[in-house]
Amino acid sequence: MLLHNSFGMLLAEQVFGPSLQNSDGRRVFTRELAAQHILEDLGFIPTVADCLGELPLRPWMAGRRRILATASSLHSLPLTNENFNGVPDD
């Protein structure tokens, strides 16, 4: 499930190039081949958010601060370097 999503399609294209030659000697687009594979396996092409949306949060995922937050509470946080233990302009 890790790569059976829209990101996996992009990654396949970066690894294998924009097109491949199939066993019949025809050029096929890598993204189309990846999409067909995912559709056959899952019936739809999920986004990364679809794949990770129900992932349970674990303490180690919060880094050193050990703060567990919900997705809705993250939208209200100001995005500054200090929130990520960074130094301004680093």
Image (tube, grey):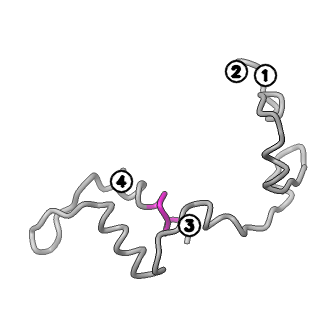
Instruction: Work out whether mark 1 precedes mark 4 in sequence or the reverse, and give the earlier one.
Output: 4
Circles 2 and 1, Cβ within 8 Å, touching? The answer is: yes
Q: Which residue sits at x=46%, y=80%?
A: 43
Instruction: Work out whether mark 2 precedes mark 3 in sequence or the reverse, and give the earlier one.
Output: 3
**Spatial separation of the CA atoms under disc 3 and disc 1:** 32 Å
Dot label at residue 2: 3
Picture quarter containing residue 33?
Answer: bottom left
Name the residue carrying label 1. 87
* Secondary structure at numbered mark 3: loop
Nearest to the observer: residue 3 or residue 60: 3
Dot label at residue 36: none
Residue 38 location (% of width, % of height)? 42, 74
Q: Which residue sits at x=10%, y=74%?
A: 24
Circles 3 and 1, Cβ within 8 Å, touching? The answer is: no
In this view, 70 is above or below 22: above
**Spatial separation of the CA atoms under disc 4 and disc 3:** 16 Å
Q: Looking at numbered disc 1 in the image, what kind of residue is underneath it?
A: Val
Q: Say few, some or many: other residues with alpha carbon within 10 Å of mark 4 (under 14 / 14 to 19 / 20 or more).
A: few
Picture quarter containing residue 84?
Answer: top right
| Quarter of the figure with the N terminus | bottom right
Q: Looking at numbered disc 3 in the image, what kind of residue is underneath it?
A: Leu
Q: Which residue sits at x=44%, y=81%?
A: 41
Which region of the structure is painted magenta?
3-8
Name the residue carrying label 4. 15
Residue 42 location (% of width, % of height)? 48, 80
**Spatial separation of the CA atoms under disc 4 and disc 2:** 31 Å
Q: Which residue sits at x=56%, y=66%?
A: 2
Q: Does the magenta stretch include residue 4?
A: yes
Name the residue carrying label 2. 90
Q: Looking at numbered disc 4 in the image, what kind of residue is underneath it?
A: Val
